[in-house]
Amino acid sequence: MEAAALLHDIDKLPAVRPTVAALAHGAGSAEWLAWHGYPELGDAIIGHPVTRLADGPWFDRWFEGASIEALVVAYADKRAGQKVESMAERFASWEHRYPPEVRAEKARGSWTPETLTAVRQRAEALEARVCELVGVAPADIRRLEWTGRALRFARET
Ligand SMILES: [Fe+2]
């Protein structure tokens, strides 16, 4: 789970993106990791992009059969920016960074107000399921203790 969480956005790296450019975000990370000997991580990565929440049939199929690792990685993506945030804060950040005209272009016009409402409802369902599975309330979600040291180390090297 931690490896998948740490590597879920690897297809955004400039050195990786061209090699998986034909694939959707997330699927590119899974494919690249499979090529490099880690096919087991793909299942936990492929469902994380927020755009998956906009595709109802895809999300419903994934949500029904997703592993706990996949659910946690997808949920963590909805809670973690540079710091752990509530989903409301995270969605507000996305809406600020990707105003409606940009979202429409990136998602090929599918981000109508109705879609945005459905996205939020699916995100809330994801949060409810993950928090029930791990027995923690959304407000009690915190970074693991080791991440502070790891982030400081990464910044200093
Ligand atoms: Fe991502």
Image (cartoon, rainbow, N blue to C red):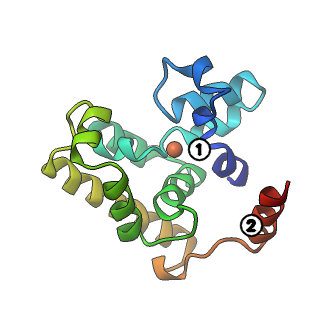
Q: Is residue 74 visible?
A: yes
Give the residue number, with chain letter if any, for mark 2.
147
Q: Residue at x 68, y 26 (%)?
A: 15
Where residue 55 appears, x then y in whole percent? Answer: 29, 39
> For this view, does 89 lie left or right of residue 15?
left
Q: Amino acid at mark 1?
A: Ala
Q: Is residue 56 visible?
A: no
Residue extending farthest to the front is: 156
Q: Residue at x 60, y 52 (%)?
A: 69
> For this view, does 12 lie left or right of residue 104?
right
Where residue 86 appears, x then y in whole percent? Answer: 43, 72
Give the residue number, with chain letter if any, for mark 1.
44
Where residue 103 appears, x then y in whole percent? Answer: 28, 42
Q: From the image, state whether disc 1 or disc 2 is nearer to you.
A: 2
Q: Circle 2: is it few (<14), some (14-19), or many (20+) Cα within 10 Å?
A: few
Using the numbered discs, state the Cα–Cα distance from disc 1 to disc 2 in whole angstroms: 20 Å
